[in-house]
Amino acid sequence: MESKEALLQRLSDCVFEMEDEEVVDVAKEYIACGYDPQEGMLKGLVDGMQRASVLYEEGEYFVPELIVCSDAMYAGIAEFRKYLPETEDTGIGKIVIGVVEGDTHDIGKNLVRIMLETGGFDVHDLGRDVPLEAFVDYVKNNDVDILCMSSLMTTTMPGMGTVIQRLKEEGLRDKVKVMVGGAPVSPAFAEKIGADGYTKNAIEAVAFAKRLVGAA
Amino acid sequence: MVIREMELIRLEMTPKERAAAYARGEEVDRIPTTLSAGETAPPLYGIDICDYYFSADAMVEVESRLAEDFQADNLGMGLGLRSLLEALGTKMKYPKKSVSYIDVPALKSFDELEGRELVNIEKDGRLPIMLEAFYRLQDKYGEVRNLGSGLAGPFTTAAGLIGTENFLKTMLKKPEKAHKLLQYSTDNVVKCCKDFHDKLGINFMISEPMGSGELLSKRQFEKFFVPYLKQCVERMSEFQNIPSIHICGRTRDRWDEVVNAGVSGFWIDNTESLEEFKGLYGDKVSLSGNLSPVEVLKNGTPQEIADHVRECIREAGDNPRGYNLCPGCTTPVGTTKENMIAFMNAAAIYGRRARKGCVPEGLKQSV
């Protein structure tokens, strides 16, 4: 029987090397050995995703590689989930994320979502071209720690400011922290619209989100 | 020099005369200057963008008004990033006040490529509407203006056929399928350009936002982008002028490969340096760009626009193989007429008496 450490390493390698089919076989082997699925997820799969994100920061892995690594991670997670008890609250915080109205560029947002989930958050994804009121409504009707908004077009960026304004008008601004991102967004813009922060990529976003909920 | 006048400085030479003279190395009244505004300008003329796409009348109206109001050197609707895709079966959404976007890609799987037909510009998508508009513009302006267009190249088109994330993943996991799609995509781009050219004599340029360094590694670029760009350039050059290319965003690390693919010119975005490009490749290809479209052209004051135009001309006005002044990318929706006039006027002043490979007299005299 292979040692837990060896199997965790193989799980991590599968994610890192984008082996989205082999990862399921390794996950099954791991479970068959009687090892803890939660640990398999965090120390195996998530570890692989974090190794991938280091290469992304170094400019070795790009968006396509991260997407396929995350496919492998999620394939492994789906297998492990069969053996985990149903729990409601597993995350370190609740996040709602979306691309602002008028904008359909969502690859960056998807990556941020993946990395936030990898980082331990429960994330609700509103998708792309999200009507501004939908952000406000979600915060109003749900338990949310952080609202994340993204845009790739300078013409849709002002929508972020409008959402923050609407949150104030509804008396919801203090209920939630607001993070913004996207290629045309800047720290200066984030400050101008009253956001709590701007992060320039998915990796920074996770670190910042953790600080916001006090989990860092 | 302070730009106050919001009336367009009118010029004597026709765009056709200017283009021909500049190409011959003669002095022209103004540096070649273009605005890529057809798809985003309809609201300036009270036309909703969603209506513009489906009406030859609207297209002719917008192109005519742009020609009269701004006297840029280009005329002709771009097929842009999505017209060919739509003709090949990708479904679009049409918001009222913004450009269209992809809703559902044409292909659910790569197997659907088997025996799939190539585009027919007389029947598919909105191409017949554009064809009619081109004919009418040719009749109206053919004596004084060269009709031109541009469209997404093979790589960006391939992404839109199967879905961007899907395409990016397939390049990594099933490269042979990605290549098959890219070949189909190339065949369509070439056929589309040839068919329009055969009917109207239009020359096309290629746009490839997906080739940007923001998205694609150099490794993948060399494997999946370059071969099809080379093929496209070679095949298009058999019937039209050698095409030029526009890639948005970061491109510095792939300039070499793009130039060596045989393009006639490179339109770079505002994130890159005109001066640096000129220094490295100015003896090989013409150069276009690169006023910041949003920060300056849309959101800047007329004075800021003038200052930035001056800087562009200073950097690249003397590019040995020629320079075309234009924004770094498409003129954004919501750019005012006033700002577009400021841009054209600054071009007329600082780009006055231009000659290929030489600093324009207008710039020299502005010091």
Image (tube, coloured by chain):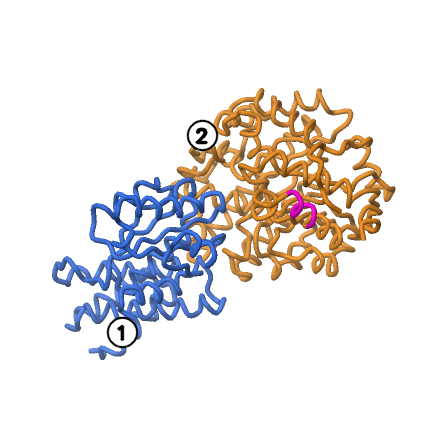
Chain colours: A blue, B orange
Q: Is residue B81 magenta?
A: no
Q: Which residue is mark 2?
A: B96
Q: Nearer the viewer, residue A151 or A3?
A: A151
Look at the image and tell me in which quarter the N terminus of chain A lies: bottom left
Check disc 1 and give the amino acid type.
Leu
Q: Nearer the viewer, residue A101 or B92?
A: A101
Does A214 appear above or below A164?
below
Residue A46: give x, y in percent of width and height.
30, 67
Q: Distance from label 2 to label 1 (Cα)?
A: 52 Å
Residue B215: give x, y in percent of width and height.
50, 55
Q: Is residue A166 left or right of residue B360?
A: left
Of marks 2 and 1, the one in the foreground = 2
Residue in view at x 54 percent, y 45 percent: B183
State which chain disc 1 sits on.
A
Q: Is residue B303 magenta?
A: yes
Does B31 appear above or below B9?
below
- What span is colored magenta in the figure? B302-307
Q: Which residue is mark 1?
A: A8
Q: Are marks 2 and 1 in contact (CB under 8 Å)?
A: no
Q: Is residue B358 left or right of residue B49?
A: right
Residue B321: give x, y in percent of width and height.
78, 50
